[in-house]
Image: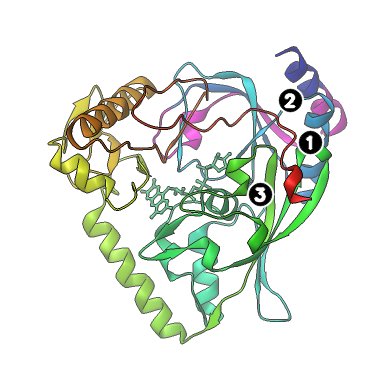
C-alpha cells in the first residue's frame, strides 16, 4: 500500500499529462455495472506513456492491472484500495501494414478490428465482431466464439514485461494460447501493447453477411439487454457449461440481484442492484450444484477480484492477477 502511494505520487510528479482518476468507482468500467472504487485508474494517452507508467510501477515494486473494456471482470463492492489499474482506452491505432497484415493497439475494440478487416476484404475475424472486448483483453483471454479464436488470427504480440522493464515481441507460437487462456494469463507481469493479425483475403459483402448473421445469433440466444460479463464458466472438456447448469435446474436461479440468465444458462446477469457478493455466491452455488449432480468442476471464466477469494474444492482456484512473479524464464 505504501509503495503504491509512492508510485502514485511519482506518476503525478513525472507524468503530469497522464489522466489519473483516484478512487474511481469501477462499476463505471465494468460490463456487469458492479464494483467499488479502485485506488487509481491511470489512462495513458499513448504507448510511450504506458511504458513510462509501467517503469514507475516496476521501480516501486507494485504490479498494475491492465484494463480493457472491463467485459470479463467482477470487481468487488468494497473496492480495491491497493490496486492501480491501467486503462488501454486511448491506445487506438489501427492500420493495414504494407504486407497486408493488420496492426492494432491494445485498446482497439474487437468490433472495430473486425469491421476494419471487413472493409479491407480480409476474412477470419468475423467471429470476434460481437465480443465486447479489446485486443489486449481478448488476447489475454484468447477470446473466441462460433468456432473461431483470436489465436487463429494473430501473428505476433508486442508486450511490456514488467519484471524486466522490457518490450517483447512474441510470435504467436510463443504466446502459449489455449482455450480461454494464454501466456499473458498464465504468467502475470505482461501488458499487451499491440498485435499484428494475419487474415485471408475474402469478399467484403460475404464477410459483412457472416458478421450480421453471427450478431443475430447472439441477440437471439444471449441476454444482451442485461449487464453481464459473458459466459460465467469455461467449457469443461466434453461438455457445455450452459447445458450442465440448465440440466441442474438452475436457469433463472437468483441470489439477490444476480441471476442465472433465463435466456442463456451460461450467463450470470445483473438484473438490478446486484452486489459482487451476489454474483460470487451465485457462481459458487452453481459450481456446487453442478458438481454434486455431475461430478464435473466448473472453472470460472470471469476474473474475480480481488484474487484472494478462495474457492472451495469443486475446481481449480481463481487466477491470481496481482502476484508479481519473475516468470517466464523458459520464454527467453
Ligand atoms: C455480453 C458479453 C458477451 C461475451 N461474449 C464472449 C464471447 O463470445 N467469447 C469470449 O471469449 N468472451 C466473451 N465475453 C467476455 C469478454 O468480452 C472477453 O473475455 C473479452 O476478450 C475481454 O476483453 P476486455 O477488453 O473487456 O478485457 P477486460 O475485461 O478489461 O480484462 C480481462 C483480463 O484481461 C486483462 N487485460 C486487459 N487488457 C490487457 C492488456 N492490454 N494486456 C494484458 N492484459 C490485459 C485484464 O487485466 C483482465 O485480467 C463476453 C462478455 C459479454 C459481457
Which numbered disc covers residue 175? none
Kindly indicate the quadrant of the structure image that contains residue 50. Answer: top right
| Nearer to us in this view, 261 or 291 | 291
Q: In this view, does 312 lie above or below 208?
A: above
Which numbered disc covers residue 163? 1
Mark 1 → mark 3, Cα distance in angstroms: 24 Å
Q: Nearer the viewer, mark 2 or mark 1?
A: 1
Pick whichever of labels 1 and 3 is earlier in the sequence: 3
Q: At which x and y percent is residue 184? A: 62, 46
Pick whichever of labels 2 and 1 is earlier in the sequence: 2
Which residue appears at 53% of the width and 78% of the height? 119
Assess mark 3: CB under 8 A from ligand 1?
Answer: no
| Mark count | 3
| Callout 1–callout 3 Cβ contact below 8 Å | no
Which residue appears at 43% of the width and 66% of the height? 148
Q: Is residue 19 magenta?
A: yes
Which residue appears at 84% of the width and 28% of the height? 59
Picture quarter with the N terminus: top right
Range drawn in magenta = 10-34
Which numbered disc covers residue 90? 3
Which residue, as the protein is rendered here, is positioned at the far top?
Answer: 2
Residue density around tag 1, few if under 14, some if 14–19, many if 20 or more, within 10 Å: many
Q: Using residue 300 as the reference point, say whether residue 83 is left or right of it.
A: right
Which residue appears at 52% of the width and 61% of the height? 150
| Nearer to us in this view, 40 or 262 | 262
SS category of the residue bearing label 3: loop
Q: At which x and y percent is residue 47? A: 76, 50
SS category of the residue bearing label 2: loop
Pick whichever of labels 2 and 3 is earlier in the sequence: 2
Q: Which of marks 2 and 3 is in front?
A: 2
Residue marked by disc 2 = 62
Amino acid at each position: 500500500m505504501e509503495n503504491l502511494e509512492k508510485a502514485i505520487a511519482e506518476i503525478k510528479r513525472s507524468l503530469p499529462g497522464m489522466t489519473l482518476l483516484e478512487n474511481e468507482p469501477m462499476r463505471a468500467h465494468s460490463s456487469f455495472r458492479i464494483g467499488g472504487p479502485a485506488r487509481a485508474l491511470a489512462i495513458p494517452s499513448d504507448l510511450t506513456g504506458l511504458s513510462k507508467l509501467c517503469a514507475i510501477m516496476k521501480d516501486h515494486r507494485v504490479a498494475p492491472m491492465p484494463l480493457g473494456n472491463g467485459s470479463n471482470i467482477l470487481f468487488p463492492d468494497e473496492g480495491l484500495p491497493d490496486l492501480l489499474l491501467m486503462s488501454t482506452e486511448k491506445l487506438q491505432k489501427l492500420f493495414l501494414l504494407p504486407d497486408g497484415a493488420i496492426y492494432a493497439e491494445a485498446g482497439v475494440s474487437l468490433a472495430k478490428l473486425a469491421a476494419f478487416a471487413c472493409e479491407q476484404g480480409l476474412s477470419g475475424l468475423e467471429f470476434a465482431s460481437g465480443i465486447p472486448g479489446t485486443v489486449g483483453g481478448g488476447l489475454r483471454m484468447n477470446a473466441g466464439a462460433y468456432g473461431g479464436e483470436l489465436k487463429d488470427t494473430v501473428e505476433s504480440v508486442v508486450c511490456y514485461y514488467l519484471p524486466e522493464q522490457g518490450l517483447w515481441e512474441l510470435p504467436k507460437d510463443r504466446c502459449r494460447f489455449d482455450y480461454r487462456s494464454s501466456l499473458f494469463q498464465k504468467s502475470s507481469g505482461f501488458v499487451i501493447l499491440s498485435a499484428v493479425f494475419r487474415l485471408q483475403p475474402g469478399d467484403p459483402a460475404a464477410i459483412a453477411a457472416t458478421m450480421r448473421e453471427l450478431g443475430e445469433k447472439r441477440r437471439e440466444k444471449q441476454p444482451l439487454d442485461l449487464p453481464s460479463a459473458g459466459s460465467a464458466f469455461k467449457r469443461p472438456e466434453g461438455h457445455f457449461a450452459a447445458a450442465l447448469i440448465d440440466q441442474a435446474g438452475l436457469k433463472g436461479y437468483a441470489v439477490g440481484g444476480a441471476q442465472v440468465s433465463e435466456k442463456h444458462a451460461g450467463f450470470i446477469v445483473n438484473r438490478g442492484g446486484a452486489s459482487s457478493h451476489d454474483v460470487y455466491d451465485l457462481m459458487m452455488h452453481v459450481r456446487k450444484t453442478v458438481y454434486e449432480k455431475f461430478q464435473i468442476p466448473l472453472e470460472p471464466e470471469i476474473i474475480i477480484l480481488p484474487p484472494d477469494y478462495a474457492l472451495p474444492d469443486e475446481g481449480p482456484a481463481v487466477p491470481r492477477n496481482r502476484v508479481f512473479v519473475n516468470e517466464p524464464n523458459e520464454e527467453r
